[in-house]
C-alpha cells in the first residue's frame, strides 16, 4: 500500500459513519423505479456538500444524476443504483450499491488533484424494471455515458467475486384480438382471444424440452378477458425470454417463442400482435478493469472467490456493451441459498454485513479508480480489450 492508496482508504474511513447513515436512510425510504425522488435528492445533496459538481436530473431522467470531481478525461464512472422492490423494499440491496459508489468517489476525490482526469458518480434509476425500459437503457439512449472511459459497479450478494454469467433478456408484450359473441347463444360467431394466450403458453411449454438448459422463459397473463359469458375479444400476456448467449437468444430462441404466438393465432383466428418492450444485454466484464478490481480486492483484504454466476439479468449489461465496464459482488453475510429479492436481503442491507460489504466495495472501487487515473495506459488497455471483446 503506497501513500496515495493509504490516503484514499483513510478518506473513506473518515466518512464511514456518514456513508452507513446514507445507506440506511435509503433503505428506510424504499422507492420503486423512476420514483426514487428521495434517494436521488439525498445522494446529490450528500455529494454536493462534499464539493462534487452535480447535474440533477441527468440525461432527461427525473431521478438520474451525475456528480463529478476532477478535470477532463479520462472519466471513470461509479454506478449507483437505488431503486427498491414493491412491498419488499430494498430486497436487492441497491441502497448499498449507491453507498459504495458514493464512498468510492469520496476516496478518489481525496487524491484527485494528484491524478489525471475525473471521477463521476452516475445515479441510474429503475434497474429492477427490466421488462419495461430500465434506467441505464434510457440514459444510454440519451448519450449520458458518451464521455465515460470506464465504469465500475458493485452489487451485494451471498458471495464475493466478479460478476459472471448473467442473462440477456427480451421482454415481449403479446396481445390477441378476437371477436366478441355470446358465449352460449352464438359462440360460433366469436373468436376467442384468451385461447390465443392459453395456446401460446402451452406451445411455449412444449418448446421447453428443446431449449438450451441455461435459457429461461417466464410470463404472466396481463389481460384474460372481461366476463365469462362473452367470448373474449382481447387478451394479452407478458413473456420474458432469457439466455446467457445473446446470439442464441436473438437468432434461435426468440423466433421460436414468437412462432408459438403466431401458431396460436392461426389456431384460433385471433390476430396476434407482438411487441418487444425491452432488450437487456448480458454483461461483458472488461478483462483489464476486472483485473484491477481483483488486485484492489486483494489489497483490501477481501480477495475475490470464484466468479459469481448471477443467472439473472441487469441493465449493467447494456452499459458494458457501450463502454468498458466491470461489475463485482461482495458477500453481505447471508448464507448461500438465501432467497434474493426477499425481506432477508432488505434486512441485511441495513445490518452490519451489508455495511461491511458496502465499505469494502467502496475501497475496492476507489483503489481501482486511482490505478486507472494514475496510469492512463490502463484506460487505453481497457478500451482495447473492450474493442476486441465486442467483435
Ligand atoms: Zn439488484
Image (cartoon, rainbow, N blue to C red):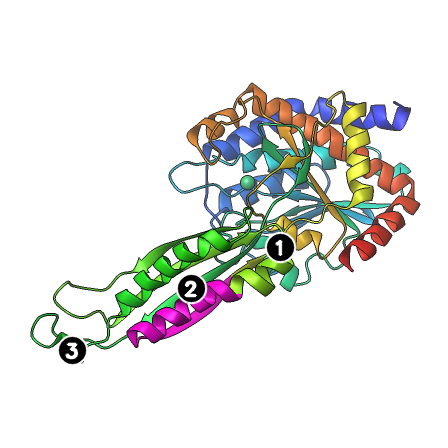
Q: Which image quarter: residue 327? A: top right
Question: Relative to 285, is 222 on the left or the right?
Answer: left
Please identify the residue farthest to the left as the structure is shown: 185
Q: Which residues are magenta?
A: 255-277
- Main SS category, magenta section: helix
Residue beneath label 1, please? Answer: 281
Q: How many other residues sit within 10 Å of disc 2, few (<14), some (14-19) or many (≥20)?
A: some
Give the number of the mark in front: 1 or 3.
3
Where residue 384 appears, as percent x and y from the top left, is 86, 53
- Quadrant where the N terminus is found in the figure: top right
Q: Which image quarter: residue 196? A: bottom left
Circle on res. 188:
3
Q: Secondary structure at mark 3?
A: helix
| 177 relative to 116, above or below | below
Q: Secondary structure at mark 1?
A: loop
Residue 127 in magenta stretch: no
Separation of residues labelled 3 and 2 (CA atoms): 28 Å
Nearest the eye: 137 or 188? 188
Q: Residue at x 46, y 43 (%)?
A: 31
- The residue at label 1 has a CB less than 8 Å from ligand 1: no
Where residue 58 appears, as percent x and y from the top left, is 62, 56
The answer to the question of whether label 1 and label 3 lie on touching residues, with beta carbons closer than 8 A, is: no
Q: Quadrant of ligand 1?
A: top right
Residue beneath label 2, please? Answer: 173
Where residue 123 appears, as percent x and y from the top left, is 62, 47
Residue 273 in magenta stretch: yes
Q: How many other residues sit within 10 Å of disc 1, few (<14), some (14-19) or many (≥20)?
A: many
Amino acid at each position: 500500500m503506497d501513500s496515495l492508496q493509504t490516503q484514499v482508504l483513510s478518506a473513506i474511513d473518515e466518512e464511514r459513519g456518514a456513508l452507513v447513515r446514507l445507506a440506511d436512510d435509503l433503505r428506510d425510504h424504499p422507492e420503486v423505479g423512476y420514483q426514487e425522488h428521495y434517494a436521488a435528492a439525498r445522494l446529490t445533496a450528500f455529494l454536493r456538500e462534499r464539493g462534487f459538481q452535480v447535474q440533477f436530473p441527468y440525461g432527461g431522467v427525473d431521478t438520474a444524476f451525475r456528480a463529478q470531481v476532477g478535470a477532463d478525461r479520462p472519466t471513470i464512472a461509479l454506478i449507483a443504483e437505488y431503486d427498491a422492490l414493491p412491498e419488499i423494499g430494498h430486497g436487492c440491496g441497491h441502497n448499498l450499491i449507491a453507498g459504495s459508489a458514493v464512498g468510492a468517489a469520496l476516496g478518489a476525490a481525496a487524491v484527485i488533484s494528484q491524478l489525471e482526469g475525473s471521477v463521476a458518480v452516475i445515479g441510474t434509476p429503475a434497474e429492477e424494471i427490466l421488462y419495461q425500459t430500465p434506467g441505464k437503457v434510457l440514459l444510454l439512449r440519451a448519450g449520458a455515458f458518451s464521455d465515460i472511459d470506464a465504469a465500475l459497479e458493485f452489487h451485494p450478494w451471498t458471495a464475493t467475486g466478479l460478476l459472471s454469467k448473467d442473462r440477456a433478456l427480451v421482454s415481449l408484450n403479446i396481445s390477441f384480438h378476437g371477436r366478441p359473441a355470446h358465449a352460449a347463444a352464438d359462440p360460433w360467431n366469436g373468436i376467442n382471444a384468451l385461447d390465443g394466450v392459453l395456446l401460446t403458453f402451452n406451445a411455449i411449454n412444449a418448446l421447453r424440452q428443446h431449449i438450451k438448459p441455461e435459457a429461461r422463459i417466464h410470463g404472466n397473463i396481463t389481460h384474460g378477458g372481461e366476463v365469462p359469458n362473452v367470448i373474449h375479444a382481447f387478451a394479452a400476456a407478458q413473456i420474458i425470454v432469457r439466455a446467457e448467449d445473446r446470439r442464441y437468444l436473438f437468432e434461435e430462441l426468440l423466433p421460436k417463442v414468437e412462432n408459438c404466438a403466431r401458431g396460436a393465432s392461426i389456431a384460433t383466428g385471433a390476430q396476434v400482435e407482438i411487441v418487444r418492450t425491452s432488450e437487456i444485454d448480458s454483461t461483458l466484464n472488461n478483462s483489464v478493469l476486472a483485473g484491477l478490481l481483483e488486485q484492489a480486492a486483494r489489497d483490501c483484504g477481501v480477495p475475490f472467490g470464484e466468479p459469481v454466476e448471477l443467472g439473472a439479468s441487469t441493465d449493467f449489461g447494456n452499459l458494458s456493451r457501450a463502454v468498458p465496464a466491470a461489475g463485482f459482488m461482495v458477500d453481505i453475510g447471508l448464507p448461500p441459498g438465501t432467497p434474493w429479492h426477499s425481506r432477508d436481503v432488505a434486512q441485511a442491507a441495513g445490518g452490519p454485513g451489508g455495511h461491511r460489504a458496502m465499505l469494502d466495495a467502496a475501497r475496492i472501487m476507489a483503489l481501482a479508480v486511482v490505478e486507472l487515473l494514475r496510469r492512463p495506459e490502463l484506460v487505453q488497455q481497457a478500451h482495447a480489450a473492450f474493442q476486441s471483446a465486442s467483435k
